[in-house]
Image: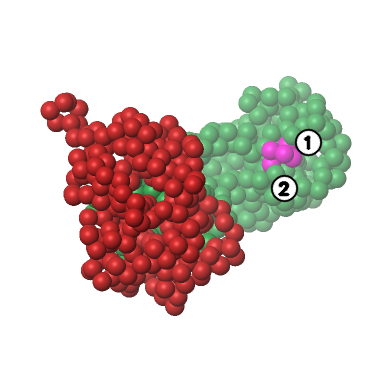
Amino acid sequence: MLLIKLAFRNIFRQRRRSLLTALSLTGGYVLSVFSISMQDGSYANAIAFFTEDHSGHVQIHKDDYLDRAKIHKTIDNPNAIATILDKHPSIASYTTRVFAPALSYSDDGNTPVQLIGVDVLREKQTSRLYQKITDGNYFADSPNDDGYFSAMIGAGVANSLEVGLGDELILISQGADGSIANDIFIVSAIVGENNSPDKNTVFLPLSGAQSFLTMYGKVHQFSILLTDISDAREVATELQSSIPSLSVAPWQVVESSFYKTMQADREGNLVMLVIIGIIVFIGVLNTVLMSVLERSREFGVLKAMGSRPSKIVSMITLEVTMLSAMSIVLGLALAIPLTYWFSTAGIELPEPVDVGGIKMSRMTGLLTPTVFIIPMIGIFFAAIVVSIFPGLRAANVTPTAAMRSH
Amino acid sequence: MTIVIETKDLCRYFGDSEETMVKAADHVNIEIEKGEFTAIIGPSGSGKTTVLHLMGGLDNPTSGEVELSGKNIAKMSGGELCDLRRDHIGFIFQSYNLIPVLSAEENIEYIMLLQGVKTSERKKRVKEMLALVGLSGLENRRPGKLSGGQQQRVAIARAMASRPDIILADEPTANLDSKTGIALLDVMKELNEAHDMTFVFSTHDEKIMSRASRLIHMRDGKVELDERK
């Protein structure tokens, strides 16, 4: 207690100097918290957008379908897989899909499209396809009275072919058995806008797509949403052991290029934070060194009385750590409301950004304990490192020489 | 009688060459017995402070030995010397050297904290020491709010609190007026007589040296005369 009292009083000996040092530490802390919150918030939003938009948190494919997609690489027993998924407590929802390239025709032209067959009911619970409809209605699972399945088409396809709601759309592709697939579909909805990633996509009901591609009862993909995205790797590993014949991948593998870019960007940001920290702590080092030089005589007395050098180093470290702790308390008082505001209200973007067909008009931060704890650990660690050099200087004074100094 | 501290052919030379070398202590042989109240006297530059520093393990001799309770402290490591000073030697300095941000009682308590004395025992001893030096009631004052004489009394209490074998005082009254200086010496003398505490102090004040029971006269780093009253 006496040591803490001594450290506290030493900090307040030069109030103005300590206050300025504390303010620079506080500024560094708030800046770090805000920076991490903004970066993690942006990535969390982006990850939420694409996982909830189309990729899901975990995907299941046949073999290397993820890297080399071929129509014949199918999951032949989707019902057996569904039984396993239904029992897993971490899975919120899942859907099945088939993919194929196709050529679309109308009376006014043709255009290549990406064909995606989706489970009409499950897709609604697993992706944002339903929310991305800009015109028309979500399609039905069964064909209409004339025997035609409905299709939802990207805005780009609609514009290229000049087709609208209720118009006929002809698709030509290759069936899984090698046959030529062609059929007529009725446009029930327009998805996204001209600049959306889905602009050249045609969505079909799963049964319609399976029938069209002659892959009855087979799918290419299971897309799974979890109750907690952070469990993705763990759940993928568990599922992989349950389904060894198929490939199970978490979103970090499915969207590996995004994930690698994100990690590289995080490392870049960390370097920036370290540079900010070094600048702040050079100031702190200067303050502590000044304080140590001014108190040389006292350190000489303490050594004469029998203080071991390690005791003096720990005394300086305690002072710097306490100053850092006070700065962090002040920093938290500023950073918590600021981060709360940033995570709830956020910053309005001058121009809305289209992310996966979803309009993003606001940048929001992340409010988690990690956002506050990481800079806190950084500051305490740096405080200890910074205090070592002045501490050693204080500890190595010669008592007789130091007591002669003024 | 028990010998508390003994110097044998103790030398401390400053400077590298023969021409510039200063012999601050030159073959000094002193034996201090338990309970003695000894003054090392001599003019400025005679080597009083150097001998006290060597006795207290604050400086290393060029040659010779210092034995404290039979142990040669001249050969001890830095850490061992720290422990020795903490547990066996009390210091009183000319300019008090109290920690300015600590109160009188905290200054006294600090050395016991280094020794690992329990809080309750520390508080008890602080009270006793302050009473012994006549400063009861001033325990919460910081050095800046105490007179020179009061600060030096706190320094005496601090030196006593660790229960050392010997207290070394370097010109303890030099910064005080003669009346306060004599009063302070009387306090030290009372502690010496009442508690059998061994004191060695340096001075060049004749009024002060008259209080000592033994006078060691030094000149040019050598003991010129050792007289017991």
- Residue A90 pos. (x, y %): 77, 47
**Residue occupying the point 42% across, 66% down:** B190
Image: A267 above or below A167: above
**Residue occupying the point 66% across, 46% down:** A230
Residue A239's tag is: 1
Q: Counting residues from the N terminus, which is met first, the one under dot 1 or under dot 2?
A: 2
Q: Main secondary structure of the magenta part?
A: helix
Image: A39 above or below B205: above
* Closest to the observer, A248 or B31: B31
What letter labels the chain drawn in red? Answer: B
- Residue A317 pos. (x, y %): 44, 49
Q: Magenta stretch?
A: A232-236
Mark 2, other Cα within 10 Å: few <14 / some 14–19 / many ≥20: many
Circle 2 sits on which residue? A226
Chain A drawn in what color?
A: green
Q: Is residue B1 left or right of residue A406?
A: right
